[in-house]
Image: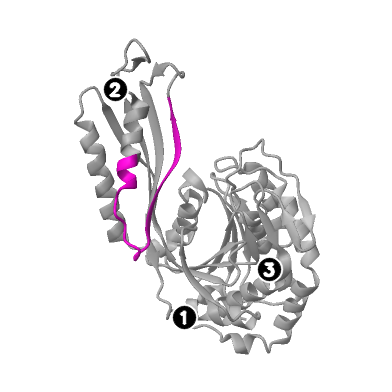
Amino acid sequence: MHMIPIETLVQNGRVQAALAYFSEHVPQFVEQAIAIQQIPAPTFAEAKRAAYVAQRFSEIGLVDVVQDELHNVYGRFPGSQSADHPPLVISAHTDTVFPAETDLTIKRQGQITYGPGIGDNSTGVAGLLALVEGLKVGEIRPLADIWFVANVGEEGLGDLRGMWAVVERFGEAAVYLVIEGGLYGQISHQAIGVRRYEISITTPGGHSWGNFGQKSAIHELGHLIAAIDKLQLPARPKTTYNVGIIEGGTSINTIAQSAKMLLDLRSEEPARLEILVAEVEKLVSLRQKLPNVTVQMTQIGNRPAGRLSREHPLVQQADAALRQSGWDKVSYIASSTDANVPLSQGYTAVCIGLTESSNAHRLDEYMDSTYLAAGLHQLLLLTLSVAGI
């Protein structure tokens, strides 16, 4: 895989002009992130935000701007020798974990902007727009086509459905850069495997006094959770479980007839994830054998694992671009992002971040724009290293 050295790129006058543009326009990039954040976009309801992004793609001069049936938004920055070079796909997810009625009010404190979804991933989507503007300001013409994609379905039960469609469209020839608003200083080249299940239990139930002793679906669910909590997991490869939601019951004085939970299982290693799944399935089967207890385990999510080696040219160039942006404490991480999809297929992909953010998936989420220019510097240099100039 041939890439332009980062040291060569930074000596190019057009690249320098784009880098200077990023440094001088951080406040405008923050305003763009806020404009995106102000449009509700729960997973499976991203259409309104997608329409806004499509409009912005057209306004800043991308060509072939289109939405697919999922509301992924695509726009192309033409390459001068696109017939001879595979495309570069740069994506950022538009969806958030927050319901449509969430109060999206923004609060500011110096370089810090507070607001649900501001870092994850409104800043990432704003970064797509900023990168296009930087390319135009520098009058930079890449050799390969660069496809900018604002995709749906990254969060929760979206199960990466947007990125599956993107990867199906561009295939194995493309290189994939996945952008998150936070994570600056980190390079995610390893995709964590994730399996998600709904486990439901039904029992006869009854009155809390008159039928005391009858099986309760809630109590049985509690026994199952306690059994999962006793599983022995290795420290390496990191392997985890989490019961994120439990529901059930009718009233305080009713022995519950039904209850269910949502279970999240993860591991850095696919084989270890399979072991954990088998262990949970065994615990479920034990409860299925109890009289008057029906247990059903249904898979509702599958984020496959994959990785690039740390020595892969794309990972090495991401590192070099990050160091060139002024950051020398590089962290290599494993995570669950849209990069899971191409990595799981053996395609070339990496996920990088634009600045620092924290409290993701919380109402007090915030984004610190201190490193935003540097994050855009890394993104531009890595983009041109892959796409050519």
Segment tinted magenta in the rendering: 226-248
Three-letter code, disc 1: Pro
Please give the name of the residue rendered at 51% of the width and 77% of the height, measured from the top-left corner.
84
Q: Residues within 10 Å of mark 2 (few under 14, many from 20)?
A: many
Residue lying at 25% horizontally and 43% vertically, measured from the top left: 281
Q: Specify the quadrant that holds the C terminus.
A: bottom right
Q: Residue at x 65, y 79 (%)?
A: 325
**Image quadrant assignment for residue 141:** bottom right
Q: CA distance from mark 2 to mark 1?
A: 58 Å
- How many marks can you see? 3
Above/below status of 268 relative to 198: below
Q: Residue furthest top?
A: 210
Marked residue nearer the N-terminal end (3 or 2): 3
Expressed as whole percent of the image width and height from the top left, the position of residue 303 reads 40, 53
Question: Separation of disc 3 and disc 2 at Cα?
Answer: 59 Å
> Residue 131, which numbered label?
3
For disc 1, the marked residue is 313
Amino acid found under the numbered disc labelled 3: Leu
Viewer-closest of 139 and 211 = 211
Report x, y in % for residue 39: 70, 45
> What amino acid is found at the position of numbered circle 2 in the picture?
Lys
Residue 189 percent coordinates (x, y): 46, 69
